[in-house]
Image (spheres, helix red, strand yellow):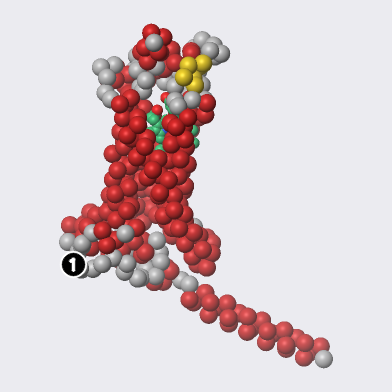
Amino acid sequence: MKRMMVLLQCMLLTAFAAKAMAASGELQPQQWQPIEEIAIAGDIPEFRGMPISPELPVIDPVVAPNYLDALAPATFWSGMLTYSFFGMIAVLSLFVVLNGKSKLAGGFSGNKVDRWSGMDIFVHWLGGIACLFLIATGLIMGTGRFLLEPNMGASHWIGVINSSVSLHDMMAWPFIVGWLVMVIKWMPKQMPESCDLAWFGKAGGYLNFGSFKGQHPDAGFANAGEKLWFWTFAIGGAIIVGSGLVMMFPSLVETKDAANLSLLLHLVCAVILGAFAVVHIFMATVMSEGGMECMVTGKCDENWAKQHHNLWFEEVQKR
Ligand code: HEM
């Protein structure tokens, strides 16, 4: 009887193992696509490590050779996305350890100045939170195939990549609305001023050593660093939205080359905007004492306004 039970257990185990092996045989994206594959060659699904199913209308199936030269393998883009995002976090963390934060020289005064409206705050967080989701899911889409899938196994990876792609497509819409309203509404406040070059020359007053220490360069409503972020966000955002829409609706373009160009532009802008978004969040949360309350309450401390936006504060006083 005991022998019969052991035999039965062995048979059951063998049956389960065979079933598991058969199932894992169905889900092996890395077998379908070798890792060195050029992202362009098989359109976006292959870049994600998904089965080959060309989604683009192949009216002109010939891909110009210069496109293939310009587009590096998917591993290159995976590295670019990872290093630009996590590398920037590492560099800024090191910077704050060596340099320290930018404190308010006179401390908080307790007097508040109106800076952003309720509508400004709403659109900032609508676009900003959507952007954070886009960065997170975009990182998974661009790098997960090499960094996550080998550690989690093919069947879990399929779930992760499918949810990331859906979330990425979903978050595009609040991002587009937030981006559009922020760009149109805030553009007049972000125009170049004569004090901008001097602001860069003094590193915005954020360096706490040598002759830079204690400097508070002139700035209007937006300082030169914020303007650089705004215009990168405005122009890079336009390209990333346009190219993203082409990938979502491939029939918007006629040829495979145009679709591949969209993927290339999307990746370049993702690298730039991802790294700059890290700088922006770091400046608002860690580096600039008193900066964060602007986008929470819409008001800033009088001493923060005097130290970081003196020309704007003088104008506000005159009103
Ligand atoms: C946790 C994330 C974020 C925090 C804490 C944050 C914080 C802030 C703060 C405090 C300001 C106002 C600065 C001032 O009054 O001078 C601001 C402005 C701005 N934010 Fe964000 N932000 C975040 C994410 C984002 C993201 C992801 C985007 C892009 C979609 C974005 C786009 C902007 C733009 C374009 C401005 C106006 C330019 C500027 O003043 O720098 N923010 N943000």
Classify mark 1: helix, strand or loop: loop
Q: In the displayed image of the protein, which residue is found farthest to the top?
A: 318
Amino acid carrying mark 1 in the image: Asp
Question: Residue 65 appears at what percent x and percent y?
Answer: 17, 61
Residue 136 appears in the picture as rendered? yes
User: In what quadrant does ligand 1 lie?
Assistant: top left
Q: Around disc 1, counting alpha carbons within 10 Å, would you say few (fewer than 14), some (14 to 19), or many (20 or more)?
A: few
Write the residue at 32% across / 47% down.
240
Measured along the vertical axis of the image, is residue 81 above or below residue 93? Answer: below
Write the residue at 47% across / 62% down.
162
Q: Is residue 291 left or right of residue 257?
A: right
Residue 101 appears in the picture as rendered? no
* Occupied quadrant, residue 199: top left
Q: Is residue 4 left or right of residue 114?
A: right
Q: Which residue is mark 1?
A: 60
Measured along the vertical axis of the image, is residue 148 above or below residue 230? Answer: below
The C terminus appears in which quarter of the rendering?
A: top left
Write the residue at 77% across / 91% down.
4
Question: Residue 299 appears at what percent x and percent y?
Answer: 49, 21
